[in-house]
Amino acid sequence: MSTPTVTEPAVTAAGPGPNVPEPGKARNEKGRALAVRIGLPLAVGIVLLAAWQILTTRELVSPLLLPEPSDVWSALDAGIIQGAWWEDVRVTLAEMIIGFAIGVVSGLLLGALFAYSSLSRIALYPYVIALQSFPKIAVAPLLVVALGYGMSPKIAVAASLAYFPVMTAAIAGFTEIDKDEHNFMRSIGATRWQEMRYLRLPNAMSYLFPSFDVALIVALLGAVAAELVGSNAGLGYILVERQAFGDTAAIFAALIVLAVIGVVLQALVVVIRRLLPRSIVPR
């Protein structure tokens, strides 16, 4: 008589669940990424500064072309730390900010006009391109003659540069919309204003914020370029005045101030974009 064989049910170990990063590991990865983003540019800056110091101390480059870092620091100390240039910085920032604001508003309005009206785009867009093709450094003297040596011509040049990237981004954002969403808005009888508010404008935000980076920088460049032509204040005025005295250290210091302003403004736009809810600025 044979004994029946009892087979025990196979027990399979549960496999590991979905890969969920450990909190500590995620924090470490974020810390390393932050260290790279800060440390790498800092390391490059130190290398460039060391190369600059070597070139100047060994007189491999003429001091009229490349002053010593210590001389540039002395000019920065006098201009920024001791405050000799603060009024000029304020003037340039005011010209840039006002010009940027005018450029953003006019760019949005033109973008909306060209997005909604193909007839106006056919009639006016070639002239917009033609005006944008004019070198602004050549137009600046005409504006200075017409508007004087105050802030007005600098604001005009800044705005004339800032509006174009915003306009092109607005056209793309207002026109490149999801067809299904557009058809749905039409099916429920949405007005043009409702379509703009709930569909086109939210879609355009993802296009507009990158254009604000560009618009800020070109507005700063436009304001300074106009100051180079004719002004009695501003960082462009500092550049012209110091050039007349052959003070390359002060020229480099003013250029460093402009570079810092550009970097800070670009970082500010990025921070604002990240602080805004995703419903306003899609990531």
Image (spheres, rainbow, N blue to C red):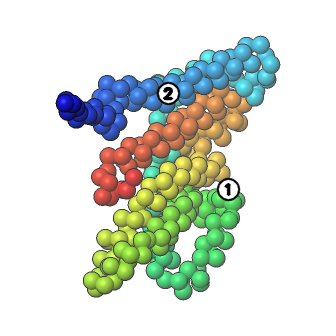
The residue under the point 50% across, 56% down is: 211
State the image quarter where residue 181 is shown. Answer: bottom left
- Tell me which amino acid carries mark 2: Val
Q: Residue furthest top?
A: 58
User: Where residue 203 sits in the image (x, y, percent)?
Assistant: 40, 65
- Tell me which amino acid carries mark 1: Ile
User: Where residue 264 sits in the image (x, y, percent)?
Assistant: 46, 39
The residue under the point 39% across, 71% down is: 200
Q: Nearer the viewer, residue 104 or 230?
A: 104
For the residues marked 2 and 1, what is the alpha-carbon distance in whole angstroms?
A: 39 Å
Residue, disc 2: 36
Quadrant placement of the N terminus: top left
The total number of labels drawn is 2
The residue under the point 50% across, 68% down is: 172
Viewer can see residue 145: no
Q: Nearer the viewer, residue 11 or 25?
A: 11
Circle 1 SS class:
helix
* Disc nearer the start of the sequence (2/1): 2
Circle 2 SS class:
helix
State the image quarter where residue 27 is shown. Answer: top left
Residue, disc 1: 137
Badge 2: residue crowd in 10 Å (few <14, some 14–19, many ≥20): few
The residue under the point 32% across, 39% down is: 18
Label placed on residue 43:
none
User: Where residue 251 sits in the image (x, y, percent)?
Assistant: 64, 33
